[in-house]
Image: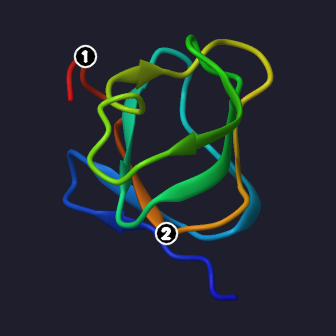
Amino acid sequence: GIPVLMTSGDEEGWPLLPGEQEIDLPAGSLFSVLALSDLAGLTLRGVEWPLTERDVPMGSSLTLSNRVAGGEGLRVGLGRGNAVLLARPHFGTL
């Protein structure tokens, strides 16, 4: 229940737990979702390649190298599992 942001100064990371959250990243930011377990019901909105309630096995490359679209902001929903969203908001590549 405590909001967490991890940062190296160049990269930022947010733990993703079941539920929904909005992540404040500028349009064009590159990001990846790294599954720490099998994920169920992953939804990504406000991105170049959206997902809707997708099951993602741990180790899948499906959630690597996406980009925040302009407008509505990045919204993440997760039904079950644990993951980390890693982003480089000020650079062009992950």
Q: In the image, which disc is placed on residue 44?
A: none
Q: Residues within 10 Å of mark 2 (few under 14, many from 20)?
A: some
Which residue is located at x 39 percent, y 28 percent? 62
**Residue toward you, 20 or 9:** 20
Is the C terminus in the top left, top right, bottom left or bottom right quadrant? Answer: top left
Which residue is located at x 64 percent, y 20 percent? 50
Name the outermost residue toward the bottom: 1
Side (left or right) of 67 relative to 47: left
Q: What is the CA distance from the residue labelled 2 to the residue labelled 1?
A: 26 Å
Q: Position of residue 55 (x, y in %)?
A: 59, 44
Which residue is located at x 56 percent, y 14 percent? 49
When the figure is inspected, residue 21 is found, relative to residue 42, above or below; the finding is below
Helix, strand or loop at mark 1: loop
Mark 2 vs mark 1, foreground winner is 2
Query: Which colour assignment does the render follow?
Result: rainbow
When the figure is inspected, residue 27 is found, relative to residue 6, above or below; the finding is above
Side (left or right) of 65 relative to 4: left
The first of marks 2 and 1 along the sequence is: 2
Name the image quarter holding residue 47. top right
Name the image quarter holding residue 78. bottom right
Q: Position of residue 13 (x, y in %)?
A: 37, 58
Helix, strand or loop at mark 2: loop
The amino acid on which the numbered mark 2 sits, given as a three-letter code, is Asn
- In this figure, which residue is indicated by the disc labeled 2? 82
The amino acid on which the numbered mark 1 sits, given as a three-letter code, is Gly
Q: Position of residue 91 (x, y in %)?
A: 25, 24
- In this figure, which residue is indicated by the disc labeled 1? 92
**Residue toward you, 73 or 38:** 38
Q: Residues within 10 Å of mark 1 (few under 14, many from 20)?
A: few
**Residue toward you, 52 or 45:** 52
